[in-house]
């Protein structure tokens, strides 16, 4: 016989049967009203800021992996556009809606199928901000002071070092924990924020009750793409990028200028693929047998950087062409993208509210009047 664990939280019924999670709204009698039936798969959450101009670093470090994970259908995945994070650096409010639309368009164009996952806007789920406040009470000030992204961004924006920039990782932890996410597919630069999210989850669970799983970062095969200048990671603020939606001619031209291996100066010089950013991009984009040949021919000196870049141009253009085509199509039908956000926001919010009921109960921030409390 199947046993069901049924809990009523904030107007929702959650029933756990062996391996199957049923979520339904309290409508009819207290039975299992038909609702969304969802296999109990590991939960994935990730997000990006709508700051405009996603680049090949974002794609190879994060987006491509998101699309693959969704296609494999082994997870329950949510992808967020984190507009509330984006306000912590100088921005123009009148441009934000367009940037949000561009980000959602890029997610879908990159192959993240909105019918197979939830794509939503962070500010559509104000519970993220509520949870961030509660989590700030179990976050150590010293941990926030150690965050390298805070140090970098406060150096970049000396004129506007605001409290939001400092508590940014707490909101990021809330984004993740509010969906009880197990895995967070991100680039290498987010590892430190993920460590903190785990620490915050641990502290909350120890101080109150076990509400949150400890989320783990899931890095792609190429978690750090360097900029074309070879000096630092590819980043919009450094102007060292190849845009995800750049025209093919621009991509070819920019790739020609890419920094490779400083010790490989002339044709015939042996190269070091392990330190070369062009080779790193090959590993993400070229077929496996070609990667092996490129590695060997670079090491022997048979393959020059110019030809290696040409080969990379070919595979990169082939990869990005369908993405550009889908983005063009969606740009002609922005209503479709807005519907995805509206629908995703509603679904995400329901799930976030269910977790907040757990959080309120765990923290004693309720009485019996809500229908759930630590006493009822
Ligand atoms: P951001 O553009 O900083 O909001 O980053 C969005 C996502 O892309 C995060 O998961 C980052 O870790 C990832 N990302 C950003 N830049 C790079 C890069 N140069 N190489 C690899 N991943 C990156
Ligand atoms: N800080 C991340 C970045 O700069 C963006 C982000 C916000 C995020 N909330 C998140 C990433 C939750 C993963 C999960 O890229």
Image (tube, rainbow, N blue to C red):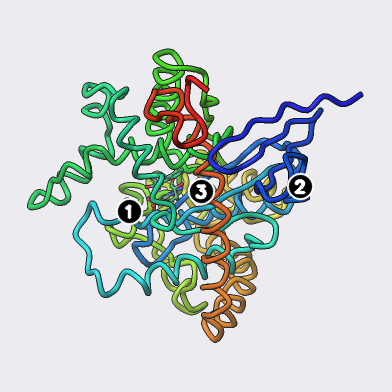
Mark 2 secondary-structure assignment: loop
Q: Which residue is mark 3?
A: 61
The Cα atoms of the two marked residues, 3 and 1, are separated by 22 Å
Quadrant of image for the N terminus: top right
Which of the two marks, 1 or 2, is nearer to us in this view? 2
The image quarter containing residue 30 is: top right
The Cα atoms of the two marked residues, 1 and 2, are separated by 35 Å
Q: Residue at x 55, y 82 (%)?
A: 328
User: Closer to the N terminus: mark 2 or mark 3?
Assistant: 2
- Residue 147 in the image: above or below residue 49: above
Left of 327 or right of it: where is 38?
Answer: right
Residue closest to the eye, 321 or 303: 321
Is the residue marked by circle 2 packed among few (<14), some (14-19), or many (20+) residues within 10 Å?
some
Q: Which residue is mark 2?
A: 33
Is the residue marked by circle 1 packed among few (<14), some (14-19), or many (20+) residues within 10 Å?
many
The circle on residue 84 is 1
User: Closer to the N terminus: mark 3 or mark 1?
Assistant: 3
Q: Position of residue 166 (x, y in %)?
A: 21, 38
Question: Is ligand 1 within 8 Å of the beta carbon of the residue shown at mark 3?
Answer: yes
Which of the two marks, 3 or 1, is nearer to us in this view? 1
């Amino acid at each position: 016989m199947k046993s069901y664990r049924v809990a009523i939280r904030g107007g929702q019924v959650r029933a756990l049967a062996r391996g199957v999670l049923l979520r339904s709204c309290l409508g009819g009698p207290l039975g299992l009203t038909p609702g969304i039936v969802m296999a109990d798969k590991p939960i994935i959450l990730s997000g990006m800021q709508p700051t405009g101009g996603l680049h090949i670093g974002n794609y190879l470090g994060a987006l491509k992996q998101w699309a693959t994970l969704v296609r494999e259908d082994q997870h329950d995945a949510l992808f967020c556009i984190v507009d509330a994070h984006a306000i912590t650096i100088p921005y123009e409010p009148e441009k934000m809606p367009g940037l949000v639309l561009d980000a959602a368009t890029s997610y879908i164009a990159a192959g993240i199928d909105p019918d197979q996952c939830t794509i939503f806007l962070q500010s559509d789920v104000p519970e993220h901000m509520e949870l961030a406040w509660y989590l700030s009470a179990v976050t150590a000030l010293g941990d926030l002071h150690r965050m390298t992204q805070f140090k970098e961004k406060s150096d970049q924006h000396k004129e506007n070092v605001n409290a939001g920039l400092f508590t940014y990782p707490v909101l990021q932890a809330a984004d993740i924990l509010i969906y009880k996410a197990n895995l967070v597919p991100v680039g290498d630069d987010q590892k430190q924020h993920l460590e903190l999210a785990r620490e915050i989850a641990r502290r909350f669970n120890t101080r109150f009750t076990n509400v949150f799983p400890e989320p783990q970062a899931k890095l792609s095969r190429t978690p750090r793409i360097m900029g074309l200048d070879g000096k630092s990671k590819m980043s919009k603020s450094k102007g060292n990028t190849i845009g995800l939606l750049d025209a093919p001619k621009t991509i070819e031209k920019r790739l020609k200028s890419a920094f490779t291996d400083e010790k490989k100066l002339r044709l015939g010089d042996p190269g070091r693929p392990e330190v070369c950013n062009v080779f790193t991009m090959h590993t993400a984009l070229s077929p496996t047998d070609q990667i092996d040949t490129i590695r060997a021919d670079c090491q022997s000196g048979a393959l020059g950087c110019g030809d290696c870049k040409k080969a990379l141009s070919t595979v990169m253009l082939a990869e990005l062409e369908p993405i550009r085509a889908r983005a063009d199509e969606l740009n002609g039908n922005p209503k479709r993208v807005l519907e995805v956000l509206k629908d995703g926001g509603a679904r995400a919010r329901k799930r976030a509210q269910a977790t907040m009921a757990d959080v309120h109960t765990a923290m004693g921030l309720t009485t019996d009047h809500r229908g759930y409390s630590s006493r009822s």
